[in-house]
Image (spheres, rainbow, N blue to C red):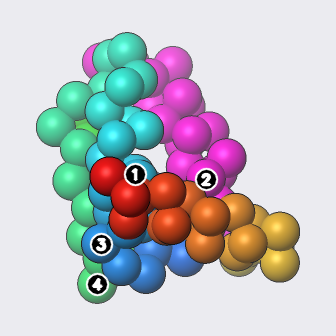
């Protein structure tokens, strides 16, 4: 099933590369796309567990659905820099 999650803090190609890499490794998640303008991550998930795993991965990288805290914003900058090295 096609899923769309809002992801705050998506800023650049580095962010996108990190999201594509991390979510692409989650079992049951495929066809990951990032819409930077709308701050959305779109993907296919075989079930709710796969969707929840994708959401948790985004949160861990600092790309949260909720208003980000200072710590989450800092995590997103680190994730962005990791994405830029790929």
Inter-mark Cα distance, 2 to 3: 15 Å
State the image coordinates of residue 4 (x, y, percent, origin top left): 34, 53
Foreground disc of the pair 4, 1: 1
State the image coordinates of residue 59 (x, y, percent, origin top left): 64, 51
Residue at 57% in and 40% down? 57
Q: Name the residue under label 4.
A: 37
Q: How crowded is mark 1: few (under 14 residues within 10 Å), some or many (20 or more)?
A: many
User: Secondary structure beneath disc 1?
Assistant: helix
Q: In this view, does 16 lie to the left or right of 69?
A: left
Check residue 57 for magenta coloring. yes
Considering only vertical position in the picture, is 72 above or below 46? below
Inter-mark Cα distance, 3 to 1: 10 Å
Q: Name the residue under label 1.
A: 19
User: Secondary structure beneath disc 2?
Assistant: helix
Choose top left, top right, bottom left or bottom right for residue 78.
bottom right
Please identify the quadrant where the N terminus is shown.
top left
User: Which numbered marker is on residue 13?
Assistant: 3
Q: Residues within 10 Å of mark 3 (few under 14, many from 20)?
A: some
Q: Do the residues labelled 4 and 3 touch (CB within 8 Å)?
A: no
Inter-mark Cα distance, 4 to 1: 15 Å
Foreground disc of the pair 4, 2: 2
User: Secondary structure beneath disc 4?
Assistant: loop
């Amino acid at each position: 099933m096609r899923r769309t999650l809002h992801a705050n803090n998506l800023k650049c190609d580095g962010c996108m590369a990190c999201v594509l890499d991390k979510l692409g490794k989650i079992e049951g998640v495929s066809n990951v796309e990032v819409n930077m303008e709308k701050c959305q991550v779109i993907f296919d998930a075989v079930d709710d567990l796969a969707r929840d795993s994708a959401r948790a991965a985004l949160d861990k990288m600092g790309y949260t659905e909720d208003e980000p805290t200072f710590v989450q914003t800092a995590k997103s900058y680190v994730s962005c820099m990791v994405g830029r090295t790929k």
